[in-house]
């Protein structure tokens, strides 16, 4: 270990690294930005497509209950888009103000919340599509399956991984 770099025992998500607090924040910020690049395009496309649906032929034939689910889905998708793009706005407003710790913490929280709203949006899309094509029961079954997958792979599996001991480095 380099003598001028403190050992970071508080880094909960990585094995010990020989880095300063600022280097750790820079690494966390870069990692978060890479994750956002992956998800932002998808959530923006989803939101854009959802916003165009009422202007297509046949939308007026969608039953009332599916219209309500559609509107909730659009709302969740818009909230998700706002939350997942907010780190960019935060960065612009905090740029050169030496607030990286605040930025990383706030961006982490908005990203997590944005992912939760994205998951709800995806479940809503599944319900609307299956409900419109195959009927209400199919929409409910497909939506329940999507919700189960979302909760399992976006919440349960990551939380179970956090509770297990870290593997030892090679």
Image: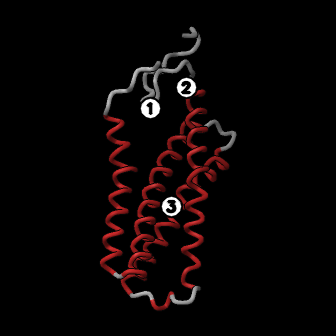
- Towards the viewer: 58 or 3: 58
Q: Residue at x 68, y 43 (%)?
A: 95
Instruction: Label 3, secondary structure: give it.
Output: helix
Q: Quadrant of residue 131?
A: bottom left
Indicate the position of residue 157 as horizontal and vertical percent values.
35, 44
Q: Residue at x 61, y 58 (%)?
A: 41
Indicate the position of residue 88 as horizontal and vertical percent values.
63, 51
Q: Of tags 2 and 3, which is closer to the observer?
A: 3
Q: Residue at x 50, y 66 (%)?
A: 77
Q: Earlier in the sequence, mark 2 or mark 3?
A: 2
Report, in whole angstroms, how far the alpha carbon at label 2 lies from the one at label 3.
Answer: 30 Å
Q: Residues within 10 Å of mark 1 (few under 14, many from 20)?
A: few
Mark sitting on residue 21: 2
Q: Earlier in the sequence, mark 1 or mark 3?
A: 1
The residue under label 3 is 80
Q: Are marks 2 and 3 in contact (CB under 8 Å)?
A: no
Mark sitting on residue 62: none
Q: Residues within 10 Å of mark 2 (few under 14, many from 20)?
A: some
Q: Earlier in the sequence, mark 2 or mark 1?
A: 1
Instruction: Label 2, secondary structure: give it.
Output: helix
Q: Are marks 2 and 1 in contact (CB under 8 Å)?
A: no
Q: Is residue 36 above or below residue 104?
A: below
The residue under label 1 is 13
Indicate the position of residue 89 as horizontal and vertical percent values.
63, 53
Report, in whole angstroms, how far the alpha carbon at label 2 lies from the one at label 1.
Answer: 14 Å
Q: How many marks?
A: 3
């Amino acid at each position: 270990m380099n003598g001028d770099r403190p050992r970071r025992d508080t880094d909960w998500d990585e094995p010990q690294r020989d880095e300063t607090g600022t280097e750790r924040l820079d690494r966390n910020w870069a990692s978060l930005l890479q994750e956002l690049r992956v998800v932002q395009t998808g959530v923006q496309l989803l939101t854009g497509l959802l916003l165009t649906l009422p202007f297509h032929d046949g939308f007026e034939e969608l039953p009332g209950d599916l219209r309500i689910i559609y509107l909730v889905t659009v709302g969740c998708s818009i909230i998700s888009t706002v939350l997942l793009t907010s780190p960019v706005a935060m960065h612009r407003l905090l740029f050169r103000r030496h607030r990286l710790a605040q930025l990383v913490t706030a961006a982490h929280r908005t990203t997590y919340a944005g992912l939760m709203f994205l998951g709800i949006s995806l479940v809503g899309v599944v319900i609307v599509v299956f409900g419109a094509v195959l009927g209400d029961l199919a929409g409910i079954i497909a939506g329940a399956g999507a919700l189960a997958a979302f909760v399992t792979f976006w919440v349960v599996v990551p939380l179970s991984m956090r509770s297990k001991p870290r593997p030892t480095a090679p």
